[in-house]
Image (cartoon, helix red, strand yellow):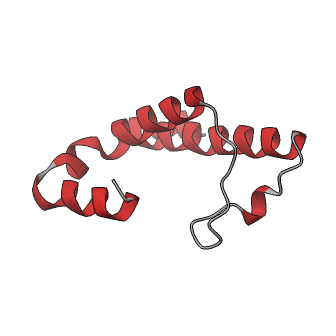
Amino acid sequence: MACATGNHAFIEFTGLMNEYIKVCQEAVEVGVDFTECTAHTGKMLPMKGYHADYLGEKLECIYGPSLKAGENAEILRKRLGL
């Protein structure tokens, strides 16, 4: 259904969600309760480098130009602790 929208960013969002599901499934396989892994708890969701790369690619496609512009870039860095 995402493809039917014709909106590339929306299609990328489905990829982002699907990747999150994969990471959660892998967490369960190694005994990690993914429902506890958020910034609010401080617990880490186990993630391999290729997961981070894929998520970065999706976020870049969806938000890249807007988040790199002016003060948005600094706001994002601060929010992510970078």
Q: Is residue 49 left or right of residue 63?
A: right
Q: Is residue 63 visible?
A: yes
Q: Is residue 45 above or below residue 74?
A: above
The location of residue 15, given as percent across then percent down, is 57, 36
Looking at the picture, tell me which residue is in the foreground, 1 or 37. Answer: 37
Q: Quadrant of residue 30?
A: top right
Q: Is residue 6 visible?
A: no
Q: Is residue 38 above or below residue 59?
A: below
The location of residue 61, given as percent across then percent down, is 35, 36
Q: Is residue 79 above or below residue 62?
A: below
Residue shown at 63%/64% (left/top)?
38
Residue shown at 32%/47% (left/top)?
63
Q: Quadrant of the N terminus?
A: top right
Residue lying farthest top?
Answer: 50
Residue shown at 83%/52% (left/top)?
32
Q: Is residue 65 left or right of residue 80?
A: left
Residue lying farthest left?
Answer: 70
The location of residue 77, given as percent across then percent down, is 29, 56
Looking at the picture, tell me which residue is in the foreground, 4 or 44. Answer: 44
The location of residue 60, given as percent across then percent down, is 35, 38
Q: Is residue 33 left or right of residue 40?
A: right
Looking at the picture, tell me which residue is in the foreground, 31 or 66. Answer: 31
Looking at the picture, tell me which residue is in the foreground, 5 or 8. Answer: 8
